[in-house]
Image (cartoon, rainbow, N blue to C red):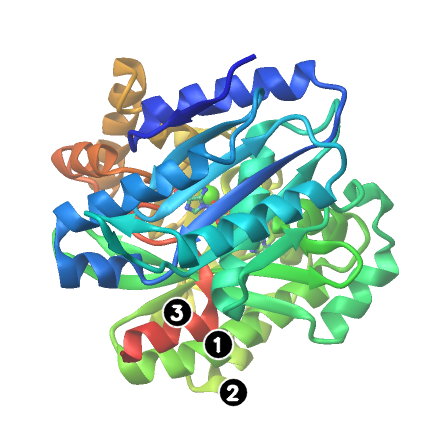
Amino acid sequence: MTSLMHRQRGPRSRLAFLAQSEAELRASSEPSAMLFVRIRDFDEFRSRHGYARADALSDAVCDALASLLRPGDSGCRIDEGAFAVFLGRLLSHNHALLAANRLQRMLQTELAVDGQALPVESAIGIANGQPGDASVETLLGQADSASQLALARRSAVERRVAPRPHEEIPKTALRDAILGNRMQIWLQPIWHLRRRQIVGVESLARWLDSEYGLVSPGDFVPLAERSGLIGDFTRWCLNATLRHAVELRKLRPEMHVNINFSPRLFAEADIVEQVVDALKLWEVPPEAVMLEVTENATMEDAERSAPMLARFEQAGIGVALDDFGIGHSSFAYLRQFPVGALKIDQSFVRDIRDFERARQLVRAMIDLTHRLGVTSIAEGVEDAGTLQLLEEMGCDCVQGYHIAHPQPAEVFIESLRT
Ligand code: C2E
Ligand code: CA
Ligand code: CA
């Protein structure tokens, strides 16, 4: 098994990298790790020194990463100023930490561009893998989150302690985290293609636990739903997001905030009043808020959902149908549900560069939104090619790593200030 550094940015080299490391993960009986390496202030470097020099810097970082690789390892340039390295055969997970520390020092002290020393600060996230473990894509996502955390904390390296499967996280730990204010709100911008500006943000929860590490909402939201904590959790998110919305709208009064909302809350008869009261408390106008409900959960209990959505609409609060396209959508439901936006699921968006069929489906979904007079938001836009295709298709808004990763709310708001 040879080692390989995929230097080109873009989906093709990322796919090759994922395929190679996936094969290695499956074949190996030793621990493995994914490192996600971000160059701090890369955008600033590029605006100051130009694209050519930024590319030269990326090449130099690739060289540094390549020098770490041993047989069974592979690396990839993921994005502007972002790289991933898969370490396939480790003696122990501590070796991943050693590698990350070595890399961080190397970038700080040994990097040179055009023969000139160029010290670079990095933020590295580590996700540990075990034989027979989750897919490398999961590891990549976990390492990415950990590197975001390193960026936000201005630390060099953060480790993502693999949580036990969420069945094993005790309900009490989640309850303590919610009630003890140990959840965080991260924000990801929503970009309007025609207006060429950020028109809003989506609020995404994060749970940072000393024992379980950074637990993603994909892991703890289902637990919250199963264990009756989803009401408390959503109320916490609502209030915490509105608190940030107040700061955000002082800087950009036109921006709206999207809040993920579990349709399980529709079982609470006074849920609309609860949301309206929270808006009054924070003095945020209803039109500045959009609730995101997943297509599936909403359709599952359409009889209960439809009147609730209508009441939210009467209160002036918009609703977006999330993960549109993967659930059991039906045109009859769309007639019944007053929604202001459809969020096209990332699984379609991801494929439009490579597959004609996905392109046609996404085009049809965008046309549908226009006919219904609602906003189309494409999720999971990861590269310029995808962005351009969506623009040509007349999509209204986009969201995704290519525009910006989710960031801790304070960090995002601070970046608007500067
Ligand atoms: P979602 O509402 O579909 O959120 C989008 C997810 O895609 C987020 O994951 C976001 O970080 C990720 N993402 C954004 N851009 C890209 C991209 O370009 N590529 C890829 N591969 N992923 C991208 P996250 O934050 O892990 O959230 C996962 C899900 O958890 C959310 O899916 C949402 O359903 C749920 N969730 C998150 N926050 C909350 C919350 O406060 N309340 C509730 N009820 N659910 C939440
Ligand atoms: Ca969402
Ligand atoms: Ca979604």
Q: Position of residue 185 (x, y in %)?
A: 54, 67
Q: Earlier in the sequence, mark 2 or mark 3?
A: 2
Residue drawn at x 29%, y 29% is 8
Q: Quadrant of the C terminus?
A: bottom left
Q: Is residue 406 left or right of residue 158?
A: left
Residue located beneath label 1 in the image: 242
Circle 3: residue type: Phe
What is the quadrant of residue 138 in the picture?
top right
Residue tagged 2: 281
> Mark 1 and 2 residues: CB-CB less than 8 Å, in contact?
yes
Residue toward you, 19 or 372: 19
- C-alpha gap between disc 1 and disc 3: 15 Å
Can you tell which of label 2 and label 3 is closer to the viewer? 3
Residue nearest the observer in this picture, 366 or 218: 218
Q: Position of residue 259 (x, y in %)?
A: 48, 61
- Residue drawn at point x = 54 percent, y = 79 percent: 278
Q: Looking at numbered disc 1 in the image, what kind of residue is underneath it?
A: Leu
Decide if residue 307 is in sight here: no
**Camera-nearest label, 1 or 3:** 3
Which residue is at the far front?
115
Closer to the N terminus: mark 1 or mark 3? 1
| In the foreground, 404 or 88 | 88
Q: Which numbered disc flags the more N-terminal residue, 1 or 2?
A: 1
